[in-house]
Amino acid sequence: MSAQAMIAPGFSDPVFQSQAAFRALLAALSEPGTLQRVTGEIAPPEGLATATAIALLTLADYETPVWLPEALRNGPAGAWLRFHCAAALVDDPTEAAFAVLDGAAGEPKLSAFNLGTDQFPDRSTTVIVQITALEGGTALTLAGPGIPGTRAITPQGLRSGFVEGLRENGALYPLGIDVLLAQGDGLIGLPRSTQIEEAR
């Protein structure tokens, strides 16, 4: 069996499914802390959550370098992304337009990615952080644009110090990365403009 034959399919209706997914991704980042579901009826490759795979199918192409942890880059996930998105998979986090992180892994830090420039803050990396659950963990309080008052989220599976990294990222605004928390078919957006504190 050829390697190409072993690669799982992507969208069955690329235009409709990518448009629906893009709307969900836009909602996640414009309404930080709200749980958004993405559906595409795909079987994601090993190592990628359904939401992560759908987000990359929707956003990545040959002009958007993607950073993956080495095990994913050299495995089925890397082959799947190269085949369906024609995306270049890069070793250097600062070169990535999109990246996938394990929320529990110690490295790389969020600050290792492209934070944008004064002239082009929008060229920073968007980082998808895969976690064990989007609910049931330590409460975090969010404030900022797109949030009336405050909003609480309770993600599980973020490494020690990750929230501090998010706060440091937010202090760089308008520079900094945008983060999407992903698990299963769910996404929660944490753009750089969001202020994040651990609930007391």
Image (tube, rainbow, N blue to C red):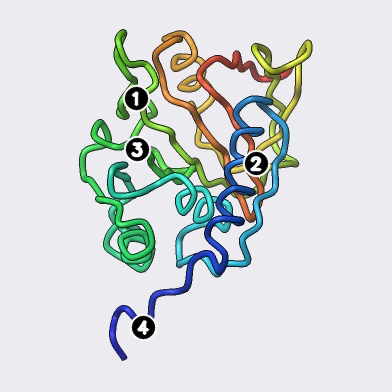
Q: Residue beneath label 4, please?
A: 5
Mark 1 or mark 4, earlier in chain: 4
Query: If the image is split into quadrants, where does the C terminus sit?
Result: top right
Q: Residues within 10 Å of mark 2 (few under 14, many from 20)?
A: many
Q: How far apart are marks 2 and 4 (CA)?
A: 30 Å
- Residue type, numbered disc 4: Ala
Q: In this view, does 161 lie to the left or right of 111?
A: right
**Tag nearer the camera, 2 or 3:** 2
Q: Which residue is drawn at 72% across and 32% down?
A: 34
Q: Residue beneath label 3, please?
A: 107
Question: Where does residue 199 sit, x and y in percent of width and height?
Answer: 72, 19
Q: Residue beneath label 2, please?
A: 24
**Tag nearer the camera, 3 or 1:** 1
Q: Is residue 196 left or right of residue 90?
A: right
Mark 1: which secondary structure?
helix
- Residue type, numbered disc 1: Arg
Q: How far apart are marks 1 and 4 (CA)?
A: 35 Å
Query: If the image is split into quadrants, where does the N terminus sit?
Result: bottom left
Mark 3 or mark 4, earlier in chain: 4
Q: In this view, does 13 lie to the left or right of 121?
A: right
